[in-house]
Image (cartoon, rainbow, N blue to C red):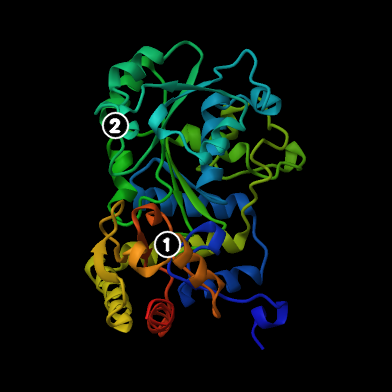
Amino acid sequence: MDIYQELGVEPIINAVGPATRLSGSIMHPEVAEAMRQASERCVDIAQMQARAGEIIAEITGAEAGYVTSGAAAGLLLGTAACVTGLDPGKMNRLPDTSGMKNEVIMARSHRNFYDHAVRSVGIELVEVGIADRFSGAGIRDAEGWEIEAAISERTAAIVYVAYAHTQPSLEEVVAAARKGGVPVIVDAAGQLPPASNLQRFMAAGADLVAFSGGKAIGGPQASGILCGRRDLIAAAALQHQDLDVMPELWEPPASLIDKSQLPGAPQHGIGRPCKVGKEEIAGLVKALRLFVAEDPAVRRQRWSALMEELVAACGTLRNAEIAVVADRKRVEIPTARLVLDEEAAGTTALELVKALQEGRPPIAANPTYVHEGAVIFGPMCLKEGEPEQIGRRLRELLG
């Protein structure tokens, strides 16, 4: 009996991808083995984070790195670091930011539910620009000069959400930030692949970058990466680490936290609830190394083969066409796009997604484009034999 049978939890066929609500990615056996080995002995977490940070820095080209409990935790810790710097007194007061630099600038078109992690630090979010291109009223979005004009003595940071369609460019935002003397935090949670993005945002001048560890990297679901300036990573670590320790016994590695720069250690920080265990650190580092070592062409071919298999398994569907296409948002990831003639089929794309979800086994499909009559199937979390199961179910539902 496997663990899901023991718990009475039904596994799903995940054709959406490594979404958190669907439990993230499927880890490589080497990643799971690294976590198992890590679980068998105890270590000093600060030392383990310091070593992981060195590996992250080497791979990303950043000054320093840190393992978080996810990209959202990275945004929280990164924002807190920009607000407090290395001041333990300020750290102890969060989320009370009165008297501190407590404004964070964000283009209005970058706003999303995940920026709650930024707001939870206690800052005021300052929105800039109007995204006419999304409303259909025009073609413009926020521009670099508007970011620059919004910077004041209260600005702690600028948050930039990275997508292929994001405006203004990161380079424009960094240029504005440099003039105002404020750091830029990049939310790059889902911007892998390509693996080159691990370095791209740092190379463009970002001060901190947050990545998810449980998506394309293939690490533990409760893991992420924060990389960037050494002083900001140290401030983030100080607000994340377990600091229930006598000062005389507190000896963090200087490569992570330089005690000589501090008047003393803060209390437990605002990031303390975002705990990362030794297992997650070990798994994330192993997954990161495997991810950057894999030939991108090999990875894409593996995913393409799964999508071609799914399309072939569908055969000829009544009132629907399915084909392999590039993901609209991430062209590195091939997907299968099913376009439904809703009127002829007597059902909608949303109803089709619901029927797939309610079958046995449940199949999760991407509903992003159901209002266009389209259902998307992704390869990243599919296992051998599952494309055939999806095709069979679609034939049952559509004929």
In the image, 244 versus 210, the foreground residue is 210
* Residue with the mark numbered 1: 348
* Residue with the mark numbered 2: 133
Type of the residue with mark 2: Arg
Residue 314 visible in rendering: yes
Q: Earlier in the sequence, mark 1 or mark 2?
A: 2
Residue 301 location in percent, x, y? Answer: 24, 73
Q: Is residue 6 left or right of residue 219?
A: right
In the image, 305 versus 328, the foreground residue is 328
Residue 273 location in percent, x, y? Answer: 68, 45
Real-space CA distance between mark 1 and mark 2, rounded to the nearest whole angstrom: 28 Å
Q: Nearer the viewer, mark 1 or mark 2?
A: 1
Type of the residue with mark 1: Thr
Q: Check the image and report above or below for 25 versus 75.
A: below
> 10 Å neighbourhood of mark 1: few (<14), some, or many (≥20)?
some
Q: Is residue 54 left or right of residue 2?
A: left
Q: Check the image and report above or below for 22 versus 257.
A: below
Tell me what residue is drawn at x 30 percent, y 74 percent: 307
